[in-house]
Amino acid sequence: MRTTNLIVSILALCMISISYGQRRKKNDAEVQSPAPIAQTPKLVVGIVVDQMRYDYLTRFWNQYGEGGFKRLVNEGFNCKNNHFNYAPTSTGPGHTSVYTGTTPATHGIIGNDWFDKESGEDVYCAGDDSYASVGTTSDAGKMSPHRMLTTTITDELRLHTQKRGKVIGVALKDRGAILPAGHAANAAYWFEGGQDGNWITSTYYMDELPQWVVDFNSSDIVESYKKPWNTLKPIETYVESGLDANNYEGLQEGETSNTFPHDLPAIWDQNGQFDLIRRSPYGNSITADFALAALEGEDLGADTITDFLAISFSSTDYVGHFFGVNSKEIEDTYIRLDQDLARIFSTLDEKVGEGEYTVFLTADHAAIDVPSYLMDSKIPAGYLDMNGMKTKFAEFLQYKYGTTDVVRDLSNYQLFLDHKILTNLDIDLDDAQEEIARELLTYEGIGQVYTASQMWKNEYTEGVPYILQNGYNQKRSGDVLLVPSVGYISYGKTGSTHGSPQIYDTHVPLLLYGKGIKQGSTVTRTEIPDIAPTIAALLGIAFPSGTTGRPIGEVLEFD
């Protein structure tokens, strides 16, 4: 009996201990702080590097310091398989897609320029004659984001914070500043070259420049970059690029060789004066200087309400177009950009606080290697004979329809047909699109052709037609869509370009770093429209109004 009582007592004591332990564990859990519903960095910095291929990260890796690209990769998150999912892959659509979370099919920016079917004229993606220039007497400031049909992540931040969060856009190119900054931005600033070399804006944002911009323009900062351009490091260490002397690079006015050094002061007047700086890494450095001046002048990241600084580095595009993606010039430009990035991050650490800001870095498109170089390397490539194609095509139209007037325009590899003339000729639009598409498919250098009818009637989920459909806007795009053969471009025989749905134009970096961002990488495919909803999910704000992308969940950290 005593043994039985002892066992019962021991069991009772154990039950009490277990019950107490469970209650204590539950109580401990109750007092633990819940995971935050959103992150609140003091500042988000969006960086777009114009014409940056993904492999610039890996090719030049050993040339980079620890504070720029390597800091983003080693301490942040690297999306290694990041792509544009539409065409054309160009600057206006690229910047817009990054910030709207959607594609031209929805946001409406179908090119840098395009044929407007209503007016019958070419329009510029940021052009707007209803506003005047600020900071210049030229028309360079007659700009606004009015052609962009949806909101941006920057717009949503302004709305979410009751416009207490500031948004500033900065780029050498007007479209690189205006489109990322969105409709509701405090300001967007871009660079006017020529004789003055000043930063300007539009009456869309303000009636006069703030004092800090006036002071910047009055300083000798921009003037200090009027100097020779030689390689930052010994040129013999630039083994990640081709020979300095070659036939695949452009030759600047006033130069007798396309090799280093480039004496910019000596060829200043022949090349547009301050416009020449765009085609050198100094344009990126000026952009970094001005962005840091904006950080200080606008008190960005100074309080707990999130601000947004959108920076686009444009000189990488100018250098790539002129010298090509395999040039010593492009390598030096990225080595110097790496230093400018390190300078920005160091200043953010000091002014905003390490761990108090979030950064993403991507590109607006990539670029093809110079086809003439590829051809000499026995790689399939070539150039479209546009004049020959136009002559042959005009003969086809005359024979088939009795007039060439059935075609209104050709832009961004899209043909715009005259629907009224086709109706008067009693020609079915779908039939005309298909007949013209079949004709163009026979031309050398044209790899694929699709019609607007196909874009309307089908839902593509992969491959080139999927990319074309994402770029096809029903109200703004053309009737016949041309795709050059892989490796073919319509461009000069020197320098690189972009615009196609091919992978060399779509594969670009996506690096995220800072508050709310995990450390790691992925080779799972991500797409450009995923960036804006990822940042929106991080901040806990509404997605941009036309969002079709999805947040990249593995990037975000809320613990």
Image: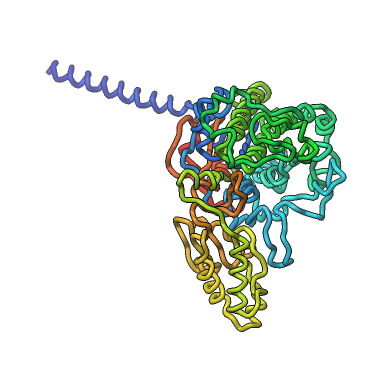
Residue 273: quadrant of the picture: top right
Residue 4: quadrant of the picture: top left
Give the residue displayed 72% in from the left and 31% down from the top: 286
Residue 111 vertical placement versus 180 (above, below): below
Q: Position of residue 69 (x, y in %)?
A: 55, 29
Q: Position of residue 239 (x, y in %)?
A: 51, 28
Whether residue 334 is visible: yes
Colour mapping: rainbow
Q: Position of residue 57 (x, y in %)?
A: 52, 33
Give the residue displayed 64% in from the left and 54% down from the top: 111
Residue nearest the viewer, comparing 375 with 358: 375
Residue 535: quadrant of the picture: top right
Residue nearest the viewer, comparing 39 with 472: 472
Q: Position of residue 236 (x, y in %)?
A: 55, 24
Residue 321 vertical placement versus 557 (above, below): below
Residue 515 vertical placement versus 320 (above, below): above
* Residue lying at the far left of the rendered structure: 1
* Image label count: 0
Q: Quadrant of the N terminus?
A: top left
Whether residue 36 is visible: no
Give the residue displayed 70% in from the left and 39% down from the top: 252
Residue nearest the viewer, comparing 482 with 378: 378
Image-based side of 387 in relation to 29, left or right = right
* Residue lying at the far front of the rendered structure: 256
Give the residue displayed 65% in from the left and 30% down from the top: 260
